[in-house]
Amino acid sequence: MERRLNVIILHADQLRAQALGYAGDPNARTPRLDALARESANLSNAVSCCPLCSPARASLLTGQYPLSHRVIVNDVHLGTGAPSIARAFKDAGYDTGYIGKWHLDGTGGRSAFIPRERRQDFDYWSVLECTHDYFKSKYWGNDDELHEWKGYDAIAQSRAAQGYIKARTSDPNPFFLVVSWGPPHDPYKAVPWRYKRGFPPRRIELRPNVPADARSRARNDSSGYYAHVSALDDCCGMVLDAVKVAGIEDRTIVVFTADHGDMLGSHGFRGKQAPWDESIRIPLLVKDPRIPGCKGRTIEQPVNVPDIMPTLLSMCGVAIPGSVEGRDFSGVVRGDDDAQDEAALFASYSPICNWHETGREYRGIRTMRYTYVRSLQGPWLLYDNSTDPFQLDNLIGRTRFVDVQVELDARLDAALRRTGDDFRPRTEYLERFGYRVGPDGAVPYKN
């Protein structure tokens, strides 16, 4: 009998889609990821449904949008009411494992122990709720003891993934493994010198949408950011090498993605949550060794984080739970179905930190060509990404684009109805879900 497919998700934190060699970034040095892209379907318009860590991660694990799984801000608890992707694979006979950053428990602080019943059906466990102290990073192991990763944690976590893969080679069961790295999320300079030295700030090429008064800081931040990305490229290579050495390349699906992007000075903003492409677009490579036509193919159909779960389950012949709201795009990945101009929904429900100070709640859609965003005050942003890839010319209210704006507004309404989103002010959602926030809009937490 043919052995079932293994699945590995390689997951970065705050990695924007543009910051990779295969995406054309002149700063990036990512030979292993570029090679992976040549062997993968590159879903080039993948979108983060909520460009913030915990909401996006909850959507990856549940296949739901944030108002359904209720994680609309960081540091709150993801319940177990909806079957997770790990539960679906486990019910199909898979071993399940998770290594790295979690950020979904939200009960006892970012270093607190997470008991087995709150691990969303992951069995192998080398996890900490959240830390970005990359050289003093701790984790709870399968022995329920607190350990420390040696050196730069992403590299140590990748070694742990190598060990997990090696140990599974004699196991008759297939496995589902998530490797969740903390970089390139800031602190940008907390990266080994051998990577940092290759990215001096003066050599960083900034995107044209970084305003003059933000360029100095953007170059400084970006130099560390791209150093982290280079380190993750090596980490990706470590895991892929382990798959090859184990002799399981021909039966292992590999996915490379992230929770959201990073503005890095574009439009004058830093961090995430903003509605521009640098924040909402994420890398999404899917390598399926059974699909020759998948290799090196770019798919422009917009897809969303909640779509990853049903797509992977379908590719492996595993039943998709009824609670899943994302769409199964396995036919598009295989090449059986033509790409469609879907409207991928993205949102900021309750802004925190920098975006709390300068931004606003919004709902938006990304199509193959356009980005359209509405705030509580009404239409806000409209870009033709085919002619304006850096989103410098807001077309809202332009006479020539009235019909486009009306059509996109209707498509946004349809996406909101489909996901049960009533688009209310942040205070109503915080009260609805019982979340208390501080002056920065964030839920207070303990390290």
Image: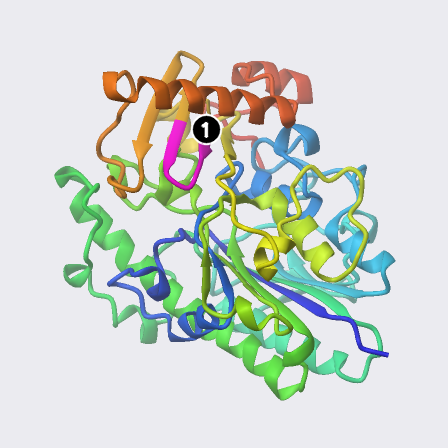
Q: Is residue 447 positioned above or below 330 on the image?
A: above
Q: Residue at x 30, y 46 (%)?
A: 264
Q: Residue at x 37, y 25 (%)?
A: 359
Q: Is residue 132 positioned above or below 279 on the image?
A: below
Task: From the viewer's perspective, tell me whether residue 328 is left or right of residue 34.
Answer: right
Where is residue 352 shown, x and y percent of the image? 46, 30
Q: Main secondary structure of the magenta part?
A: strand
Q: Nearer the viewer, residue 21 or 267?
A: 21
Task: From the viewer's perspective, tell me whether residue 321 is left or right of residue 108.
Answer: right
Where is residue 134 shown, x and y percent of the image? 47, 61
Residue 371 visible somewhere in the drawing: yes
Residue 125 visible somewhere in the drawing: no
Q: Residue at x 85, y 60 (%)?
A: 92
370 within the magenta span: yes
Q: Nearer the viewer, residue 397 or 202?
A: 397
329 within the magenta span: no
Secondary structure beneath dot 1 equals strand
Query: Which range of residues does the magenta coloring cover?
Result: 364-372
Task: From the viewer's perspective, tell me whether residue 197 is left or right of residue 240.
Answer: left
Where is residue 208 shown, x and y percent of the image? 18, 45
Where is residue 53 shown, x and y percent of the image? 53, 43
Q: What crowding class fits label 1: few (fewer than 14 Cα within 10 Å), some (14-19), or many (20 or more)?
A: many
Q: Nearer the viewer, residue 35 or 216?
A: 35
**Number of numbered markers:** 1
Q: Which residue is mark 1?
A: 364
- Can you say which quadrant of the picture contains the N terminus? bottom right
